[in-house]
């Protein structure tokens, strides 16, 4: 079994794309998959660990070596939220903690090692064992929310996501993941989908302050409550997550 499969998404993934994806390097212990259908690529992958990454982020040998060190150093951890070094601005972008008012809040640049609620939307690493227990990504959600939703559901499957300060991936030279290119309507949909994912995994009472500050998201939740609560029942069935665990995520 390979150690890593890298699942790259973002951009035009058709065969006639003017910018086809080419793996930056190859290795017998590494597999590359490209395409926006992440569920299909997850199903076709075979490695012990899956790295889900937007194509604007550079995956090189140094990053994978550091990830291997983290896996060896923290064998009980099921997922990692790497930091992103934005080479244009020099800033570091991290994973997220839960926030009662905002839903999620990004860790500060000098944050220490800790458990996180969600990774940055552009990169995450999941072990094969937790993927098998968690299932498919919810691909009806906005791409910027899918990895967060997956990390939330992973908690109920008994997994935890860890942030290690020195596990860092650089952006490609022309990329700026810190900037949100989405149009207002897309931003609204992303906020609605974030509310959907939060309520699916943690319930309405835990997110009531966030929903009260975002009435459009609350209306979206109410309008889709039947489907949402059915998904919540599936996500939390036989859940291994409890109220003591959630305190670590704020």
Image: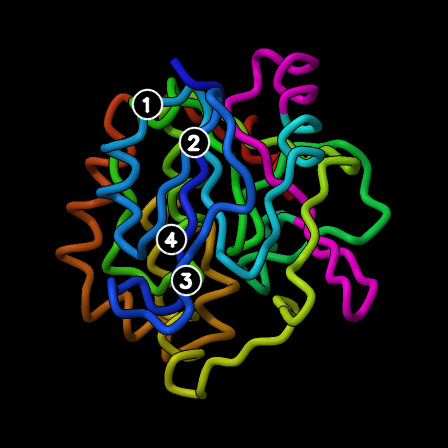
**What secondary structure is found at the residue carrying circle 4?**
helix
Is residue 45 part of the magenta span, yes or no? Answer: no
As measured in the structure, the alpha-carbon distance from the residue carrying label 3 to the one carrying label 4 is: 13 Å
Residue at 24% over, 67% down: 222
Q: Is residue 175 above or below residue 38?
A: below
Residue at 19% over, 71% down: 223
Question: Mark 1 highlights which residue?
Answer: 46
Residue at 71% over, 34% down: 62
Specify the label residue 5 is tagged with.
Answer: 2
Relative side of 173 to 165, left or right: left
Give whichever of discs 3 and 4 has the lower sequence position.
Answer: 3
Give whichever of discs 2 and 3 has the lower sequence position.
Answer: 2
* Residue farthest right in this picture: 110
Quarter placement of the C terminus: top right
- Percent across and percent down for residue 205 are 42, 51
Q: Nearer the viewer, mark 4 or mark 1?
A: 1
**What secondary structure is found at the residue carrying circle 2?**
strand
Q: Is residue 195 above or below residue 153?
A: below
Question: Mark 4 highlights which residue?
Answer: 146
As measured in the structure, the alpha-carbon distance from the residue carrying label 1 to the one carrying label 3 is: 21 Å
As measured in the structure, the alpha-carbon distance from the residue carrying label 2 to the one carrying label 3 is: 17 Å
As measured in the structure, the alpha-carbon distance from the residue carrying label 4 to the one carrying label 1 is: 21 Å
**What secondary structure is found at the residue carrying circle 3?**
loop
Give whichever of discs 1 and 2 has the lower sequence position.
Answer: 2
């Amino acid at each position: 079994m390979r150690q890593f499969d890298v699942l790259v998404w973002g951009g035009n993934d058709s065969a006639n794309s003017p910018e086809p994806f080419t793996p930056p390097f190859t290795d017998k212990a590494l597999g590359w998959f490209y395409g926006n259908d992440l569920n299909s690529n997850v199903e076709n992958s075979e490695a012990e660990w899956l790295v889900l990454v937007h194509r604007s982020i550079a995956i090189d040998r140094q990053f994978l070596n550091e990830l291997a060190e983290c896996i060896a150093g923290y064998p009980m951890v099921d997922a990692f939220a790497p930091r992103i070094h934005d080479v244009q601005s020099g800033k570091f972008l991290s994973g997220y903690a839960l926030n009662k008012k905002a839903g999620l809040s990004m860790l500060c640049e000098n944050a220490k090692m800790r458990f996180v609620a969600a990774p940055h939307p552009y990169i995450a690493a999941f072990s094969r064992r937790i993927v098998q227990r968690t299932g498919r990504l919810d691909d009806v959600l906005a791409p910027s929310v899918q990895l967060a939703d997956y990390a939330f559901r992973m908690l109920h499957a008994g997994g935890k996501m860890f942030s290690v300060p020195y596990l860092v991936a650089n952006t490609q030279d022309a990329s700026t993941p810190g900037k949100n290119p989405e149009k207002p309507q897309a931003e609204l949909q992303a906020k609605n989908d974030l509310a959907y994912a939060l309520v699916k995994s943690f319930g309405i009472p835990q997110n009531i302050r966030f929903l009260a500050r975002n009435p459009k998201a609350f209306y979206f939740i109410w309008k889709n409550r039947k489907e949402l609560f059915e998904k919540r029942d599936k996500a939390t069935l036989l859940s291994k997550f409890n109220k003591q665990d959630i305190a670590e995520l704020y």
